[in-house]
Image (cartoon, rainbow, N blue to C red):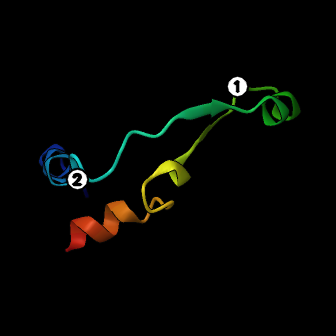
Amino acid sequence: MLSSKDIIKAHKVLNGVVVNTPLDYDHYLSEKYGAKIYLKKENAQRVRSFKIRGAYYAI
């Protein structure tokens, strides 16, 4: 189980390595499912993948 200390530590380690990525509203999915649906654009990371977070933290 993650603690708040674990999250704070990971944030400090990853600060400056990963960038905040945008949330984009998806009209098609929102209409299809009757809910406001946003897609997190993790492919906007420098390495084009969300995996950088876990890989960098493990190193």
Q: Which residue ends up furthest to the front in the rendered image?
A: 46
Give the quadrant of the N terminus. bottom left
* Left or right side of 25 for 15: left
Q: Position of residue 30 (x, y in %)?
A: 78, 30
Image quarter of residue 33:
top right
Viewer-closest of 41 and 28: 41
Tell me the crowding category of disc 1: few under 14, some 14 to 19, or many 20 or more residues within 10 angstroms, Cα based. few
- Secondary structure beneath label 2: helix
Residue wearing tag 1: 36
Q: CA distance from mark 1 to mark 2?
A: 29 Å
Q: Quadrant of residue 4?
A: top left
Q: Residue furthest right?
A: 32
Q: Residue at x 21, y 46 (%)?
A: 15
The three-letter code of the residue at mark 2 reads Leu
Measuring from the top left, give residue 26's x and y in whole percent: 74, 33
Task: State the mark number for residue 14.
Answer: 2
At a point 15% along the width and 44% down the height, the residue shown is: 8
Along the viewing direction, whichever of 44 and 27 lies nearer the viewer: 44
Q: Is residue 17 or residue 50 the one in the foreground?
A: 17
Name the residue at 46% across, 40% down: 21
Disc 1 on helix, strand or loop? loop
User: Is 35 left or right of 9, judged from the image as shown?
Assistant: right
12 lies above or below 38: below
| Label located before the other in sequence (1 or 2) | 2
Q: Badge 2: few (under 14), some or many (20 or more) residues near its Cα, within 10 Å? A: some
